[in-house]
Amino acid sequence: MGSDVTAADMAVCMSRGYEVQQLAARVDLCLGRVEKVLGGFREIQLLDWQSPAGRAYRNSVALQEVALGTAKVRLEDALASVRRHAQAVGMSAGNPAGRY
């Protein structure tokens, strides 16, 4: 009976590990989207704006780029944390004492 509990616990840990890996994949996808938007912002800033309104728009885009750049750094940190957690959950699946 004790081995049944251990097998069930391992199955739960493996399932959780898979869910955490899926979360990491979603965070990575978001990071890719952020990088694409940042690339678009950089392209906009390279355009030659002659009018005051055009320059104001480019300045506004530059401010948005800075804010999104900060969000990108936080997403990179989150992705690293989620990947570490996925690894920890995976390692605990093989260790009955380290149940998650």
Image (spheres, helix red, strand yellow):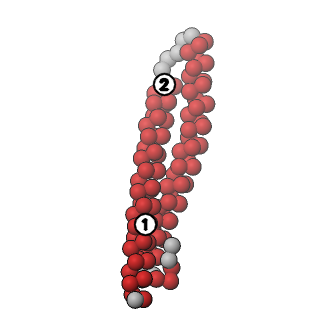
Q: Which mark is residue 44?
A: 2
Q: What residue type is labelled 2?
A: Ile
The percent position of residue 47, horizontal first and vertical second, equals: 48, 20
1 vs 2, front mark = 1
Q: Say which quarter of the image contains residue 77.
A: bottom right
Q: In percent of the image, x 57 and y 43: which residue is there?
A: 71
Q: Mark on residue 65?
A: none
**Which residue is depicted at the point 58% across and 32% down?**
64
99 versus 64 height, above or below: below
State the residue at coordinates (50%, 77%): 99
Q: Nearer the viewer, residue 65 or 46?
A: 65
Is the residue marked by circle 1 packed among few (<14), some (14-19), or many (20+) residues within 10 Å?
A: many
Q: Residue at x 50, y 60 (%)?
A: 82
- Distance (Cα) linking label 1 and label 2: 41 Å
Image coordinates for residue 23, horizontal then vertical, percent: 45, 55
Q: How many marks?
A: 2
Q: In the visual, does 47 lie left or right of 59?
A: left
Q: Please, which residue is most extreme toward the top here?
A: 51
Above or below residue 15? Residue 49 is above
Closer to us: 78 or 61: 78
Q: Where's residue 16, x and y in %?
A: 44, 66
Query: Is disc 2 surrounded by few (<14), some (14 to 19) or many (20+) residues within 10 Å?
Result: some
Name the side, left or right, on which 74 lies relative to 6.
right
Give the secondary structure at mark 1.
helix
Earlier sequence position, callout 1 versus callout 2: 1
Q: Residue 17 carries which label?
A: 1
